[in-house]
Image (cartoon, grey):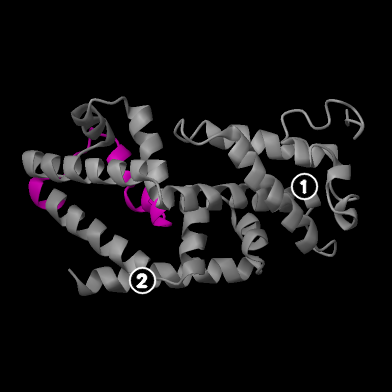
Amino acid sequence: MSIDSKSPQAGKGIPEEYGTPSSYPEEHRDSISPELLSLVRRTALHLKGRLPKNVEVDDLMQSGLEGLVQATKAFDKARNISLEQFAKTRIRGAMLDDVRRMSQTTRTTIAFKREHNAAIEKLTIRFGREPTGKEIASYLGKDVETYQKERVIIAGADNLSNDAVETTYFDNEETQPSPEEGLQKVELLSILRDSIGDLPERTQLVLSLYYRDELNLKEIAAVIDVSESRVSQILSDTSKQLRRKIDLNQ
């Protein structure tokens, strides 16, 4: 059931200045429905569950609402996509962008990164292989969920798809590599991180949206305003480029 924009529930949980469609500039009022405002709140709550406690829901919603306004400006009715679907990717993208920006300047993020890297280095030497997420969390005296949330913040600060590069931290522990394979994997991860860091900003964003945020090609295309085939080409070309880089270092 739709909520009337004049209802007290229309702006429930929404920052006051964005509480109802009438709060927006006149040219966007027809596009900002109560359902879209609700979408912003749901998206913020969903993301909050994956982020550390220092990230506030209100901050996520503020970013998402700005993304919503941008979505209404950029939406093309001729596209084979609904406004809600188009706005969803822009809202989510705006929230994640602000989380990354905030993370880049926080001492907490820097502390997490140093702490994790030191633990990974020590455990790699101790085990002769790359440590698992459980092993790293245990070494740090944290539960796995806390450790994973810290990894999300670090990944946002780097603006890279570190989760895609470092998925072996959470791999099945029953199939551990030999010490030689473990050391080779550490070297490979280092090469991948450096290579991804040298990629154009938009390519890094595509990798992040595809591997970490798990958006599909259609959703990514809507976020960066290109065709699905172009997104596919970016992923394919980047994969080949990284593979060549790896082959040259083997």
| Secondary-structure class at tag 1 | helix
User: Is residue 215 toward the left or the right of residue 236 in the image?
Assistant: right
Say what amino acid the circle numbered 1 marks: Glu
| Whether residue 69 is visible | yes
Q: Which residue is mark 2?
A: 198
CA–CA distance in space, label 2 to label 1: 34 Å
Image point 44% across, 33% down: which residue?
52
Say what amino acid the circle numbered 2 marks: Asp
Dot 2 crowding, Cα within 10 Å, few <14, some 14–19, many 20+: few
Q: Is residue 42 magenta?
A: no
Q: Position of residue 96 (x, y in %)?
A: 54, 48
Considering only vertical position in the picture, is 51 above or below 156? Answer: above
Q: Is residue 171 magenta?
A: yes
Q: What label sits on residue 147 in the rendered view? A: none
Considering only vertical position in the picture, is 219 above or below 15? Answer: below
Q: Which residues are magenta?
A: 157-181
| Secondary-structure class at tag 2 | loop
Image point 30% across, 74% down: which residue?
244
